[in-house]
């Protein structure tokens, strides 16, 4: 006796459900990959911004050092302090209260502060040959590096009194270097930096206090 067995395949509904589940899995994997790539890119920019912010404070420290050690004959005539506003190293006047500056490493710029207050100098450009960032444009510099940097300088005194031109022996420069990248908002004043400059807002900053060297 023979048994008639009918072979049954998948129905259209079963195929559609299986296809839907497969598509959900594929789309989820693609979105996860895209998100991971975006997070890696943001992480790299955050690290670069933090390093550029720290570099800003170190460049100002270098200007402080050079403004006394490289003054030469000028300092032989009278006592020179690091923050002399008339020393042609770009230091802002003590009476300004708070100054917004930019600074570059010596290979690209003149190794001095630019405290003109112009926002045009915020953009940083990367040199395709040296891979250094600076505010210079043209030549081998990439036109858009995604980063902007400002350096805020506030004068203080070692004893907490309000700084005046007579306080050169006890003057302290509070330096705050701020870097923002894609979509980040640059703070307008130094007082708003700690509150508003956050990594999740695409903003990083570094601070230091520099005392005034004196050449006798």
Image (spheres, grey):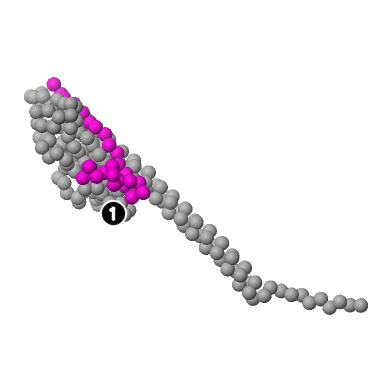
Task: Indicate whether 50 appears above or below 172.
Answer: below
Q: Which residue is mark 1?
A: 143
Task: Indicate whether 7 appears above or below 185.
Answer: below
Q: Residue furthest left?
A: 77
Left or right position of 187 against 13? left
In this view of the protein, which residue sits in the foreground, 33 or 103? Answer: 33
Task: Indicate whether 86 appears above or below 117.
Answer: above
Q: Residue furthest right?
A: 1
In this view of the protein, which residue sits in the foreground, 206 or 105? Answer: 206
Task: Identify the residue shown where x is 19% and y is 27%.
Answer: 158
Task: Indicate whether 170 appears above or below 154.
Answer: above
Q: Which stretch is magenta? A: 189-216
Task: Identify the residue shown where x is 43% and y is 54%.
Answer: 38
Q: Which quadrant is home to the C terminus?
A: top left
Task: Identify the residue shown where x is 84% and y is 78%.
Answer: 4
User: Can see residue 68?
Assistant: no
Q: Position of residue 119 (x, y in %)?
A: 19, 50
Is 190 within the magenta?
Answer: yes
Q: Position of residue 24 (x, y in %)?
A: 55, 64
In this view of the protein, which residue sits in the foreground, 55 or 98? Answer: 98
**Label 1 crowd bin: few (<14), some (14–19), many (20+), radius 10 Å:** some
Q: Quadrant of residue 130?
A: top left
């Amino acid at each position: 006796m023979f048994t008639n067995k009918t072979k049954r395949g998948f129905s259209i509904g079963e195929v559609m459900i299986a296809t839907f589940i497969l598509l959900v899995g594929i789309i989820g994997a693609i979105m996860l990959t895209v998100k991971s790539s975006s997070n890696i890119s943001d992480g790299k920019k955050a690290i670069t911004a933090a390093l550029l912010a720290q570099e800003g404070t170190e460049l100002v420290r270098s200007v402080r050092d050079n403004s006394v050690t490289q003054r030469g004959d000028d300092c032989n005539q009278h006592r020179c302090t690091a923050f002399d506003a008339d020393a042609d190293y770009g230091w802002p006047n003590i009476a300004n209260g708070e100054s917004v500056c930019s600074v570059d490493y010596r290979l690209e710029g003149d190794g001095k502060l630019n405290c003109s207050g112009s926002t045009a100098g915020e953009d940083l450009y990367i040199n395709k040959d040296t891979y250094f960032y600076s505010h210079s444009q043209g030549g081998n510099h990439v036109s858009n590096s995604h980063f902007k940097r400002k350096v805020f300088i506030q004068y203080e005194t070692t004893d907490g009194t309000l700084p005046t031109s007579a306080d050169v022996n006890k003057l302290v420069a509070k330096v705050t270097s701020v870097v923002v990248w894609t979509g980040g908002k640059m703070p307008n004043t130094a007082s708003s930096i700690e509150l508003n400059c956050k990594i999740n807002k695409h903003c990083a900053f570094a601070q230091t206090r520099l005392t005034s060297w004196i050449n006798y």
